[in-house]
Image (cartoon, grey):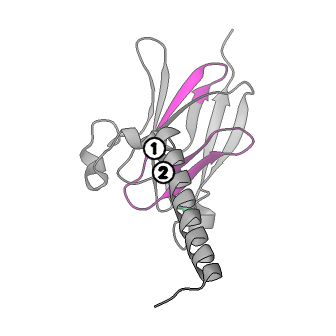
Amino acid sequence: MSVERYEKFWMWGAGVLIVLFLGAIGFSAGLQAVRPPSHLETVDPAALDAHPEFGAPSVVVRSDGAVVVTVVASMFAFAPDPIEVPANRPVTFRLTSPDVIHGFQVVGTNANAMVVPGYVSQFTMTFARPGEYAIVCNEYCGLAHHMMVGRLVVKAARP
Ligand code: CUA
C-alpha cells in the first residue's frame, strides 16, 4: 500500500498536534498544581447530623479569638440563618452539604465558594462594613434553587 506524500504530511502533523495538546493538559494539571484547594478535607455527607462540627452548624469564637462559622448548605436553605459575625475580624467559613452541590456567595463581597457534598470548603474573610448581606446559592441545585437565600449580619465591634 502506498500513501501519498501530502497524506503522510497531514497524518504526522495531526499526530504532533495531539501529542502537543495532551502534553499541555499534563503540564497544567501536573506541574502547575491546578487542583481545588477545598478537596483537602473530606466528611461523610450521609452522617452530617452526627458530626461533632457539622451536626450543629453555628458561629464559634475559639479560645485564640478566631471566629469560625460552620455552615451546612442543603436543599434549599443555609444553616445557621442568619449568620452573625463581628466586623473587622477574620472570619473563617467552613462549609459542606449533605445532598447536592450548592453555592455560597455573600452578595457585595468577595466571599464566594462552591459547597460540595463529601468535602469541606474553607475560606477566611474580613468584613469591614457592618450591615446585612444576602447569601445566595449560585449553583443550580433543584426546583427551589432560586429561593435559596440566607442572611449574613456583620455587627460593628462594641467600643
Ligand atoms: Cu442551593 Cu442552588
Where is residue 9? Give x, y as percent.
62, 74
Amino acid type at mark 1: Gly
Q: Is residue 38 left or right of residue 130?
A: left
Does any portion of residue 57 appear in the rendered image? yes
Would you call the spot at circle 2 few (<14 residues within 10 Å), some (14-19), or many (20 or more)? few
Q: Is residue 88 magenta?
A: yes
> Residue, x 56% and y 42% (percent of image)?
82
Pick the residue in front: 72 or 131.
72
Where is residue 112? Give x, y as percent.
62, 44
Q: Which mark is residue 88?
A: none
Q: Is residue 105 left or right of residue 40?
A: right
Q: In the picture, residue 155 is in which quadrant?
A: top right
> Residue, x 43% and y 62% (percent of image)?
100
> Residue, x 63% and y 65% (percent of image)?
146
Q: Dot 2: what SS?
A: helix
Where is residue 31? Give x, y as percent.
49, 39
Q: Is residue 122 left or right of residue 106?
A: left
Q: Is residue 127 above or below residue 73?
A: above
Q: Dot 1: what SS?
A: helix
If the image is split into quadrants, where does the N terminus sit?
A: bottom left
Amino acid type at mark 2: Gly
Does any portion of residue 140 appear in the rendered image? no
Q: In the picture, residue 158 is in which quadrant?
A: top right
Q: Residue furthest bottom?
A: 1
Pick the residue in front: 138 or 30.
30
Q: Is residue 129 left or right of residue 155?
A: right
Q: Which residue is mark 2?
A: 26
Pick the residue in front: 137 or 131.
137
Would you call the spot at circle 1 few (<14 residues within 10 Å), some (14-19), or many (20 or more)? few
If the image is split into quadrants, where does the C terminus sit?
A: top right
Magenta extent = 85-114
Q: Which mark is residue 30?
A: 1
